[in-house]
Image (cartoon, helix red, strand yellow):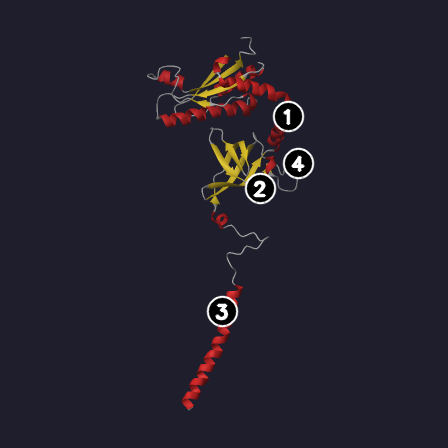
């Protein structure tokens, strides 16, 4: 009987000891957050943000905006798409624009604005952590946008009519062509060519209804894919210089074309001929309808 009593007492003690543990376990189960429940108003930490690393610094001109993304085109014609989010800091080089003490909004990121972008990268995407530019550049981009907006109604009819007639190049007179040349595999402009481009832009500016058609070419060295890309980069380099330095208006610029090694200006069997073919042709066009023909 004593043994039975001790066993019963032991069972009782074990049951008493197990009870708090079971209650504690049940309480933990009740207090554990359900991962399937989302509480409105609480922003969960994004695990991807912690995994992002420093990305490249990008310098260039904003050439397109779409939603929370922008395209930045560098001087060599290469373009990079960068995402913008609420954490992106947008600022002018000498402080926040117009003395505003808050963060600049994404509406200040205008097409044609030269920017320096610090990025983070992760998941195959670049995200802007900071976008910086100069006050003077923002003012210029704003004036261009506002001026274009003010003149929109009077310019639209003429511009669209000109672009509509570009469907057939035979309906246009080529008033002048300026060729700029490049070293093998390169896209850099010489000082002489830079001066020639601005001279062409100044002359064309004085011609009513003139448009510029820019076409890039290469010599026969290299693969077709390489030459196609190279010819497009050369054309974009020339367009950027014409717009950013020479002041040629974007709405008077036709879509650039890369023709690779097609339509050579000279035979590719000599070094002299290859040098002539590594070129970008800047054509000044005027519609025959307004040119008296």
32, 208: nearer the viewer: 32
Camera-near label (1 vs 4) is 1
Residue 98's mark?
4
Secondary structure, mark 3, is: helix
Residue position for label 2: 89
Q: Give the quadrant of residue 149.
A: top right
In the image: residue 11, left or right of residue 30:
left
Residue at 36 percent of width and 25 percent of height: 224
Q: Which mark sits nearer the N-terminus, 1 or 2?
A: 2
17, 52: nearer the viewer: 17
Residue 75's mark?
none
Circle 1 residues within 10 Å: few <14, some 14–19, many ≥20: few
- Mark 4–mark 3 Cα distance, whole angstroms, equals 60 Å
**In the rendered image, which quarter contains the N terminus?**
bottom left
The x and y percentages for residue 130 are 55, 40
- Mark 4–mark 2 Cα distance, whole angstroms, equals 16 Å
Residue 187 visible, this orientation? no
Residue at 53 percent of width and 65 percent of height: 30
Question: CB under 8 Å between callouts 4 and 3?
Answer: no
Q: Give the quadrant of residue 110.
A: top right
Furthest toward the right, the residue is: 99
- Mark 1–mark 2 Cα distance, whole angstroms, equals 28 Å
Looking at the picture, does residue 35 appear above or below residue 223?
below
Q: Which mark sits nearer the N-terminus, 1 or 3?
A: 3
Residue position for label 3: 25
- Mark 3–mark 2 Cα distance, whole angstroms, equals 47 Å
Residue 147's mark?
1
Question: CB under 8 Å between callouts 3 and 2?
Answer: no
């Amino acid at each position: 009987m004593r043994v039975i009593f001790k066993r019963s007492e032991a069972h009782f003690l074990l049951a008493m000891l197990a009870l708090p543990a079971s209650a504690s376990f049940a309480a933990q189960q009740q207090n554990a957050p359900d991962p399937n429940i989302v509480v409105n108003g609480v922003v969960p930490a994004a695990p991807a943000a912690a995994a992002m690393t420093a990305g490249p610094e990008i310098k260039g001109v904003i050439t397109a905006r779409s939603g929370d993304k922008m395209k930045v085109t560098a001087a060599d014609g290469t373009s990079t798409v960068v995402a913008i989010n609420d954490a992106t800091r947008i600022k002018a080089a000498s402080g926040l624009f117009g003395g505003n003490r808050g963060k600049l909004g994404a509406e200040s990121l205008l097409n044609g604005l030269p920017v320096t972008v610090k990025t983070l990268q992760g998941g195959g995407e670049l995200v802007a952590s900071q976008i910086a530019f100069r006050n003077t550049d923002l003012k210029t981009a704003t004036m261009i946008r506002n001026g274009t907006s003010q003149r929109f109604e009077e310019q639209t009819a003429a511009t669209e009519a000109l672009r509509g007639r570009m469907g057939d190049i035979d309906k246009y007179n080529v008033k002048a062509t300026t060729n700029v040349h490049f070293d093998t595999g390169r896209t850099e402009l010489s000082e002489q060519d830079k001066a020639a481009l601005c001279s062409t832009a100044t002359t064309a500016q004085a011609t009513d209804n003139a448009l510029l058609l820019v076409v890039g070419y290469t010599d026969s060295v290299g693969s077709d894919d390489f030459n196609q890309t190279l010819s497009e980069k050369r054309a974009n380099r020339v367009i950027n210089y014409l717009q950013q330095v020479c002041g040629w208006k974007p709405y008077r610029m036709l879509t650039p074309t890369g023709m690779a090694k097609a339509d050579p200006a000279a035979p590719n069997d000599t070094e002299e001929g290859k040098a002539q073919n590594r070129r970008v042709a800047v054509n000044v066009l005027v519609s025959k309808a307004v040119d008296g023909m």
